[in-house]
């Protein structure tokens, strides 16, 4: 499906920018309904974009853009299982992984719902066996620690989710080794007992060099401690490449498959979620899937202007293309979501960091922004200075729960939320020079000092932010939150006219690394490589 021409709608939105609020304090003062007008609550989740410089016409024009870009048709095509990932000739069906009812969907002749349920029930049985101690290590010890070996989508989702769902974690401890840097494996293993450790090798392709290298090291660690015959008791695998897993020597009963219609960065709902299921149990994992399904249904059916993922995407596009902001900051006021920004970096930047349209033509607008972030309140004491007073405008996305899981520490949560709301208010309102002078004068500062310092205490304000709120981060809500962001990326991709589901940009570095390995090892010389690369290699050789 080619991107439709949206040049007219884009131009209309760009010119419309001149009509949008310049002074957000005034916009709120003039319209007491601004919050109601520019926020959307769906089933207990609130999305508030009222602090962004938009008006009702902006939303109308953005919805027209979405229609002109064929968003509704492409959304339907995704849910239908059409091969919308054209460059890989694949369907995009992570939504099918969390669909509770069988709607008779088949892909390449395979019954999708039946296969998904089959893997889920095998995962559940295995997870229960590990959690209950029935699945033991080779010496008869129960499993106390699982180590997921994977990278990218085979790591970030489960690692982020296990942390997020800590209040529900009642299974074995979970560790995640992703980096090929031996320090990662070494520092993880040094705490562990081989006799009670289970490795899960997670790789969609089962060829990723980092994962394969780490898996070999883990196997040697088990063999050295417990003997070769112990390997079968201490490994499980998750992959779409079942033939390659068999070669690694992991028994069929411990191999959990998924399908090429699940993108790596959309795979935590599949067997890639096994560490999550072992940590929090199959029931909580099902709740997590149900939360995502609730968002899917909302995304698939709600009118564009009443649709949270659509609105999040439209405002994201507005900031990126019409306003030209280069980045977005994701700031969860939730320590347990500390890996959520990293997870979203892959979801968003690997999906929408593209420069050609679906047809292979150069794009005519900017595409995905730089995505980054850290939890609040910590970020406030690190980089918020730039958000408030730096020369770039970086839209911020605040995420928080109304309540925490620690009733006896409610005062912490109140302070956390007060900080969250204060930051979005400060970004929006700013502080004028007159206010800075007045405040300093009221504190009794000398007039001369006031004049010198006051310009440094001015905040420009009118800096946009979006806030997402919900009751508690339980598995259901957490599933909703992730699906909200997945569909937002989809919406933005459609407006950019790009394919969000391939990732050719990761290939070149992989190819060059393969060629460079013998050079680094000293088995080959640098040949005709550029003098910088050759010089870097020579430097490390000189140090060894
Ligand atoms: O190199 C990028 C990538 O292909 C990601 O898209 C993917 O999530 C990651 O590597 C890991 O791939 P695999 O699961 O096949 O090991």
Image (spheres, helix red, strand yellow):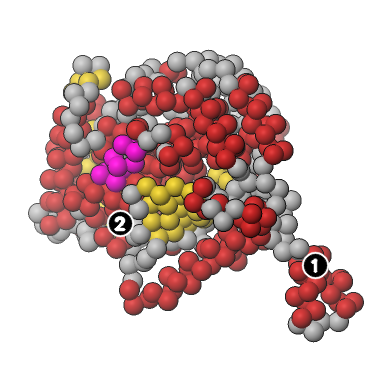
Q: Position of residue 115 (x, y in %)?
A: 18, 29
Question: Residue shown at 14%/51% (left/top)?
Answer: 128
**Number of the front mark, 1 or 2:** 1
Work out whether mark 1 precedes mark 2 in sequence or the reverse, and give the earlier one: 1
In the rendered structure, the answer to whether residue 127 lies left or right of residue 270 reads left
Is 291 colored magenta in this rendering? yes
Is 85 colored magenta in this rendering? no
User: Is 137 rendered above or below residue 236?
Assistant: below
Secondary structure mainly formed by the magenta segment: helix
Residue that extends furthest to the right in the rendered view of this protein: 448
Foreground of the two, 227 or 6: 6
Mark 1 touching mark 2, by CB under 8 A?
no
Question: Residue shown at 34%/77% (left/top)?
Answer: 408
Dividing the image into 4 quarters, which one contains the N terminus? top left
Q: How many C-alpha atoms fall within 10 Å of the one at disc 2: few (<14), some, or many (≥20)? A: many
Establish whether ligand 1 lies closer than 8 Å to the Cβ of label 2. Answer: no
Which residue does the numbered mark 1 point to in the structure image?
434
Image quadrant in which you'd find residue 207:
top left
Q: Position of residue 530 (x, y in %)?
A: 69, 29
- Residue 137 marker: none
Question: Residue shown at 26%/43% (left/top)?
Answer: 289
Which residues are drawn in magenta? Answer: 289-298
Image quadrant in which you'd find residue 73:
top left
In the rendered structure, the answer to whether residue 421 lies left or right of residue 126 reads right
Question: Residue shown at 22%/20% (left/top)?
Answer: 106
Mark 1 to mark 2 CA distance (whole Å): 46 Å
- From where the camera sits, is residue 245 visible? no
Q: Position of residue 400 (x, y in %)?
A: 44, 59
Which residue does the numbered mark 2 point to in the structure image?
474
Foreground of the two, 350 or 517: 350
């Amino acid at each position: 499906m080619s991107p439709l021409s949206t040049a007219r709608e884009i131009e209309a939105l760009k010119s419309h920018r001149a009509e949008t609020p310049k002074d957000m304090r005034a916009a709120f003062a003039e319209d007491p309904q601004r919050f109601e007008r520019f926020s959307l609550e769906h089933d207990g989740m609130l999305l508030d974009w009222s602090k962004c410089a938009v008006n009702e016409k902006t939303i109308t024009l953005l919805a027209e853009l979405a229609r002109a870009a064929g968003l509704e048709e492409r959304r339907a095509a995704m849910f239908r299982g059409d091969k919308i990932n054209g460059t890989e000739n694949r369907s995009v069906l992570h939504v099918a992984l969390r669909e509770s009812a069988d709607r008779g969907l088949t892909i390449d002749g395979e019954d999708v719902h039946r296969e998904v349920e089959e893997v889920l029930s095998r995962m559940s049985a295995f997870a229960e066996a590990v959690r209950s101690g029935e699945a033991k290590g080779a010496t008869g010890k129960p499993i106390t620690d699982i180590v997921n070996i994977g990278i990218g989508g085979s790591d970030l989702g489960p690692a982020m989710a296990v942390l997020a769902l800590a209040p529900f974690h009642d299974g074995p401890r979970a560790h995640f080794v992703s980096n090929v840097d031996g320090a990662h494996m070494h520092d993880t293993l040094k705490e562990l007992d081989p006799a009670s450790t289970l490795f899960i090798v997670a790789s969609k392709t089962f060829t990723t060099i980092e994962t394969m290298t780490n898996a070999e090291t883990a196997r040697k660690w088990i063999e050295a401690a417990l003997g070769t015959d112990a390997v079968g008791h201490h490994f499980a695998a998750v992959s779409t490449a079942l033939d390659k897993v068999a070669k690694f020597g992991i028994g069929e009963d411990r191999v959990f498959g998924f399908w090429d219609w699940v993108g790596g960065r959309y795979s935590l709902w599949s067997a890639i979620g096994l560490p999550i299921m072992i940590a929090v149990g199959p029931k909580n994992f099902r709740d997590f899937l149900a939360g995502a399904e609730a968002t899917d249904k909302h995304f698939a059916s709600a009118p564009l202007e009443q649709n949270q993922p659509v609105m999040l995407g439209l405002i994201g596009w507005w900031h990126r293309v019409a306003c030209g902001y280069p980045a977005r900051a994701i700031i969860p006021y939730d320590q347990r979501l500390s890996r959520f920004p990293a997870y979203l970096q892959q979801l968003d930047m690997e999906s929408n960091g593209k420069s050609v349209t679906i047809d292979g033509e150069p794009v005519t607008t900017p595409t995905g922004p730089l995505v980054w972030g850290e939890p609040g309140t910590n970020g406030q004491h690190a980089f918020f200075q730039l958000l408030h007073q730096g020369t770039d405008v970086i839209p911020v996305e605040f995420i928080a729960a109304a309540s925490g899981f620690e009733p006896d520490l409610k005062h912490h949560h109140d302070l956390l939320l007060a900080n969250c709301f204060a930051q979005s208010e400060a970004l929006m309102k700013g502080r004028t020079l007159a206010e800075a002078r007045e405040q300093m004068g009221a504190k009794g500062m000398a007039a001369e000092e006031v004049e010198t310092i006051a310009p440094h205490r001015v905040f420009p304000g009118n800096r946009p932010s979006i806030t997402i709120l919900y009751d508690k981060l339980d598995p259901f809500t957490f599933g909703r939150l992730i699906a909200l962001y997945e569909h937002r990326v989809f919406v933005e991709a459609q407006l950019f006219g790009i394919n969000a589901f391939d990732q050719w940009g990761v290939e070149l570095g992989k190819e060059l690394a393969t060629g460079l390995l013998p050079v680094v090892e000293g088995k080959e010389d640098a040949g005709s490589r550029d003098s910088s690369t050759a010089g870097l290699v020579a430097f490390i050789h000189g140090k060894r």
